[in-house]
Amino acid sequence: MDKTILVVEDQEDNRRILRDLLTSRGFTTIEVTDGLAGVESARINRPDLILMDIQLPGIDGYEATRRIKADAELAHIPIIAVTSYALSGDDNKAFSAGCDGYVAKPFSPRHLLAKIEQYLSPKTQEPGA
């Protein structure tokens, strides 16, 4: 697959679950534990996709997402919020901050992988294009 996913998640158990799931599907993972490190890692590593927790030490996932999306060289990177913030309207807050997708914890591995594939799969061209 040869795609790199940045995992911004402060809980070790959640990072381990995501690492095992993603590496079993051939993805390379980079893991950081706070929002500022997520922004810096995005700048340095230029991942293909970012999985962003919202409740993080330092700056939260909303602010980290805003900073990444404000950088013209990083704005194209899809960011999927993976969060236990699953109250009504929390998905809208994530989208308003710049997240491209939203998955609530606990998540179905199949659902998360489908969401990742949605953003990493080559776009199919329309017939006659």
Image: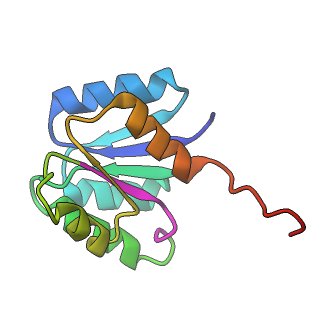
- Residue 39 lies, in percent from the top left, at 31, 61
- Relative to 115, is 129 above or below? below
The residue at 11%/56% (across/down) is 87
Image check: 106 left or right of 5?
left
Q: Which of 122/16 is in front?
A: 122
Q: Residue at x 20, y 35 (%)?
A: 106
The foreground one among 88 and 44 is 88
Q: Is residue 81 magenta?
A: yes
Looking at the picture, how far across and down is residue 99, in whole percent?
35, 64
How far across and how far down the image is residue 2, in percent?
62, 36
Residue at (55% x, 27% y) in the render: 26
Q: Residue at x 39, y 58 (%)?
A: 79
Give percent across and percent down for residue 117: 54, 43
Q: Is residue 26 above or below residue 74?
A: above
Between 56 and 113, the one lying in front of the other is: 113
> How many numbered tags mark residues here?
0
Colour setup of the view = rainbow
Q: Which residues are magenta?
A: 74-82
If the image is split into quadrants, where does the C terminus sit? bottom right
Magenta span contains residue 112? no
Q: Which quarter of the rendered picture does the N terminus lie within?
A: top right
Residue 42 picture quarter: bottom left
Q: Is residue 1 left or right of residue 52?
A: right
